[in-house]
Image (cartoon, rainbow, N blue to C red):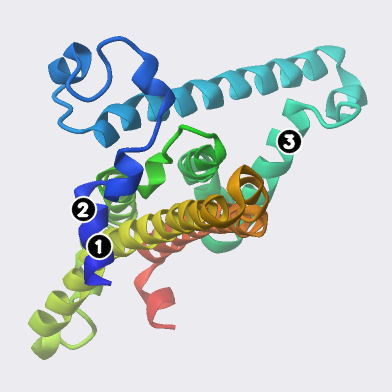
């Protein structure tokens, strides 16, 4: 585990860092290139991470724009026709299914009022992490979610949000709850609860990084074994079962990240008496 975390902190394994990426074809952007140097990128993994992230952001914004246009076209019809889904599997239908599912999940934990406030964050995290995970299936693209620093940035955003939610909803009661019900033991409770809060972003980061890193590494190993023993056909066929497992890991890890974010927010906005109950 220590060795694995060391690889994560280093960015990626040596085999993956030296593998081909489409971004190497961009003049001046690869390792040692002028653009990469100007951006302060010191290795190939960093250089390839940034365009991958912005590519995913652009893709999500484009899909959201298309889905929004579909909703506007439906609303323009007026009456009951505005609530009729599109025929077939359209971008609007897919987004509505995902958002409705996430809304029910969030509302069941924090209530309908709070769900409206936090659903945009939770839905964005779910979709972004999901698409980032799935980007690893594209040849020549390294998934951003296998990078420890990238995932830590996401987790720190969650850390800021759920603490802000607790302070804004409960005020000093949020700090008071961390101190526990017994005044004599308040310092010990406060210390333990503070450590627990600090562990949450670390837990989010390590869980996502390790799962995606190991999944990608396993695919690389199996593909290499297939190529060594069976040539090109082995490299193409042998990893197929691993790809199905990897697809499941991508979806589950995006869901877990969104679910834990919802749980942390729920614990922060709950009243003290509900906490103890």
Q: Which residue is mark 3?
A: 94
Give the distance between the C-alpha atoms of the residues marked 2 and 1, in whole angstroms. Answer: 6 Å
Q: Do the residues bearing badges 3 and 1 touch, measured as CB atoms within 8 Å?
A: no
Other residues around mark 3 within 10 Å, as few (<14) / some (14–19) / many (≥20): few
Q: Which numbered disc, 3 or 1, marks the residue that appears first in the sequence? A: 1
Name the element at disc 2: helix
Nearer the observer, 243 or 63:
243
Residue at screen point 25% across, 62% down: 5
* Numbered-mark total: 3
| Residue 263, image x, y percentages | 45, 63
Other residues around mark 1 within 10 Å, as few (<14) / some (14–19) / many (≥20): some
Q: Which numbered disc, 2 or 3, marks the residue that appears first in the sequence? A: 2
Q: Quadrant of residue 214?
A: bottom left
Q: Which residue is mark 2?
A: 9
Q: Quadrant of the C terminus?
A: bottom left
- From the viewer's perspective, is the residue at label 3 or at label 1 nearer? 1
- From the viewer's perspective, is the residue at label 2 or at label 3 nearer? 2
Name the element at disc 1: helix
Q: Is residue 17 above or below residue 199?
A: above
Residue at screen point 79% across, 18% down: 75
Nearer the observer, 203 or 112:
203
Residue at screen point 84% across, 23% down: 82
| Residue 146, image x, y percentages | 37, 48
Nearer the observer, 225 or 16:
225
Give the distance between the C-alpha atoms of the residues marked 3 and 1, in whole angstroms. Answer: 36 Å
Residue 174 visible in image: no
Name the element at disc 3: helix
Furthest residue toward top? 27
Q: Quadrant of the N terminus?
A: bottom left
Q: Do the residues bearing badges 2 and 1 touch, measured as CB atoms within 8 Å?
A: yes
Q: Which residue is mark 1?
A: 5
Q: Quadrant of residue 41?
A: top left
């Amino acid at each position: 585990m220590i060795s694995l975390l060391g690889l994560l902190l280093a960015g990626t394994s040596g085999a993956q860092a030296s593998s081909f990426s489409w971004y190497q074809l961009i003049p001046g952007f690869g390792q040692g290139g002028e653009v990469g140097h100007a951006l302060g990128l010191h290795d190939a993994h960093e250089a390839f991470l940034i365009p991958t992230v912005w590519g995913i952001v652009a893709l999500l914004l484009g899909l959201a724009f298309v889905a929004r246009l579909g909703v506007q076209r439906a609303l323009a019809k007026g009456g009951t026709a505005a609530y009729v889904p599109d025929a077939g599997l359209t971008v609007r239908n897919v987004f509505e299914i995902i958002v409705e599912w996430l809304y029910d999940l969030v509302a069941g934990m924090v209530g309908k009022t709070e769900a409206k406030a936090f659903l945009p964050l939770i839905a964005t995290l779910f979709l972004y992490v999901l698409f980032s995970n799935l980007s690893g299936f594209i040849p020549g693209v390294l998934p951003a979610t296998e990078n420890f620093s990238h995932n830590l940035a996401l987790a720190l955003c969650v850390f800021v949000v759920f603490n802000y939610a607790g302070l804004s909803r409960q005020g000093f009661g949020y700090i008071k709850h961390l101190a526990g019900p017994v005044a004599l033991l308040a310092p010990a409770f406060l210390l333990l609860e503070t450590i627990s809060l600090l562990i949450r972003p670390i837990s989010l980061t390590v869980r996502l990084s390790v799962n995606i890193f190991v999944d990608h590494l396993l695919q690389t190993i199996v593909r290499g074994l297939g190529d060594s023993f069976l040539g090109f056909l082995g490299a193409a066929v042998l990893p197929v079962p691993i790809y199905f497992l990897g697809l499941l890991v991508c979806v589950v890890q995006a869901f877990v990240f969104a679910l834990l974010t919802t749980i942390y927010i729920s614990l922060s906005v709950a009243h003290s008496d509900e906490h103890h109950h």
